[in-house]
Image (cartoon, helix red, strand yellow):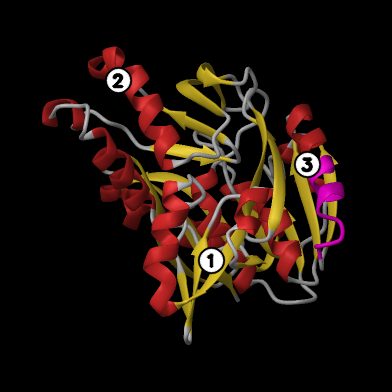
């Protein structure tokens, strides 16, 4: 994503100009560098005609709640306070926005589309979320504005990720978590990733670290997209990725141990006994846990380690909200 470089005393004026022209990327934060300010912009030849220096730089995303607040503040022009209370969070994946619209806002679909397009002028598709279906957690979507497609290219952490929401699961909210893990991994490690999807974790880690990654995915569509993503990012990757199409519960028992195992476990799947034996130093295990059960979740991991004759330290981190009082968590398990 481009960034416009201006002197700090010119930053506000430049920001107002970019906003007026629909070229300001409100999803991202400006960055201060000494006497200069880097302003996030959206792509397009028009930026180059403004007389500013333009850099190919991906500035950090704003917190998700702030994104939501931006949409809420814009829709305050059209929706009542009571209607705004029913507004749900949304995701932006590439040039596709996906949002859940509750029954209370059925009559406000056009206004929500208008608001999303104002906050994110680069959007080409706005889709309405349905329910997850099937063993691959694929959501049902209906397009309420824009092009009739659900495939896009999502950019995060220096990589490009081809996604087709009609065929494969992808969660853009894990961007920060993927970066966190990439910073924990050390050069030279052997990393195993079951339930790898279209390879978001593998790509980000291989972007930053010289490692050998083995990834496993059962969904054929996700596997094909993952192969495309390896090709797409080939010149950017420092690490190597071996991608296996198959059932993790059949593939992993045949694989050797790895320095680090990362398990973005699908909801409803218990893969602790599958993944823990394959981790020689670290296991990062994801699950969905009620806030009252986090201590029990930690104890369960500790007991499984002892059953295998291993000493371990377990730190459980809340990654994101899932539903009231239930969180997606990551257990960082250090094995002795």
The label nearer to you, 1 versus 3, is 3
Question: In the figure, residue 315 lies in which quadrant?
Answer: bottom left
In contact (CB < 8 Å): disc 1 and disc 3: no
Q: Secondary structure at mark 1?
A: strand
Relative image position of residue 49 (x, y in whole percent):
63, 56
Whichever of labels 2 and 1 marks the residue nearer the N terminus, that label is 2
Question: In the figure, residue 80 lies in which quadrant?
Answer: top left
Q: In the rendered image, is residue 18 in sight?
A: yes
Whichever of labels 3 and 2 marks the residue nearer the N terminus, that label is 2
Q: Which mark is residue 226?
A: 3
Q: Reply above or below: 60 against 126.
A: below
Q: Nearer the viewer, residue 87 or 296?
A: 87
Q: Is residue 233 magenta?
A: yes
Q: CA distance from mark 1 to mark 3?
A: 27 Å
Q: Residues within 10 Å of mark 3 (few under 14, many from 20)?
A: many
Q: Secondary structure at mark 2?
A: loop
Q: Residue at x 68, y 36 (%)?
A: 163
Q: Which mark is residue 102?
A: 2
In contact (CB < 8 Å): disc 3 and disc 2: no
Which span is picked out in magenta? 227-237
Q: Which residue is mark 1?
A: 333
Q: Nearer the viewer, residue 170 or 295?
A: 170
Q: Residue at x 60, y 49 (%)?
A: 273
Relative image position of residue 66 (x, y in whole percent):
33, 52
Q: How many marks?
A: 3
């Amino acid at each position: 994503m481009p960034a416009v470089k201006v002197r700090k005393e010119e930053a506000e004026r430049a920001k107002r100009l970019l906003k007026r022209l629909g070229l300001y990327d409100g999803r991202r934060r400006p960055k201060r560098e000494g006497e200069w300010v880097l302003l996030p912009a959206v792509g397009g030849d028009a930026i180059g005609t403004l007389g500013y220096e333009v850099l190919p730089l991906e500035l950090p995303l704003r917190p998700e709640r702030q994104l939501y607040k931006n949409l809420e503040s814009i829709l305050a022009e059209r929706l009542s306070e009571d209607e705004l209370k029913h507004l749900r969070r949304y995701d932006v994946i590439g040039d596709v926005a996906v949002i859940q619209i509750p029954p209370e806002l059925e009559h406000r679909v056009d206004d929500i589309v208008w608001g999303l397009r104002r906050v994110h002028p680069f959007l080409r598709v706005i889709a309405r979320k349905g329910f997850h279906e099937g063993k691959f957690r694929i959501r049902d979507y209906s397009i309420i504005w824009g092009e009739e497609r659900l495939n896009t290219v999502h950019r995060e952490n220096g990589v490009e990720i081809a996604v087709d929401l009609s065929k494969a699961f992808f969660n853009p909210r894990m961007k920060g978590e993927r970066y966190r893990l990439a910073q924990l991994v050390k050069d030279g490690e052997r990393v195993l990733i079951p339930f790898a999807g279209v390879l978001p974790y593998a790509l980000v880690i291989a972007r930053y670290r010289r490692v050998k990654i083995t990834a496993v995915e059962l969904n054929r569509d996700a596997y094909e997209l993952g192969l495309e993503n390896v090709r797409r990012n080939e010149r950017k990757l420092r690490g190597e990725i071996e991608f296996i199409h198959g059932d993790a519960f059949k593939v992993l028992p045949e694989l050797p141990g790895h320095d680090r195992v990362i398990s973005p476990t699908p909801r409803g799947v218990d893969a602790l006994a599958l993944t823990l034996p394959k981790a020689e130093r670290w296991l990062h295990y994801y699950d969905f846990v009620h806030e009252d059960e986090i201590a029990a979740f930690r104890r369960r991991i500790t007991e499984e380690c002892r059953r295998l004759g291993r000493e371990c330290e377990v730190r459980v981190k809340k990654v994101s909200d899932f539903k009231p009082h239930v969180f997606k968590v990551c257990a960082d398990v250090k094995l002795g």
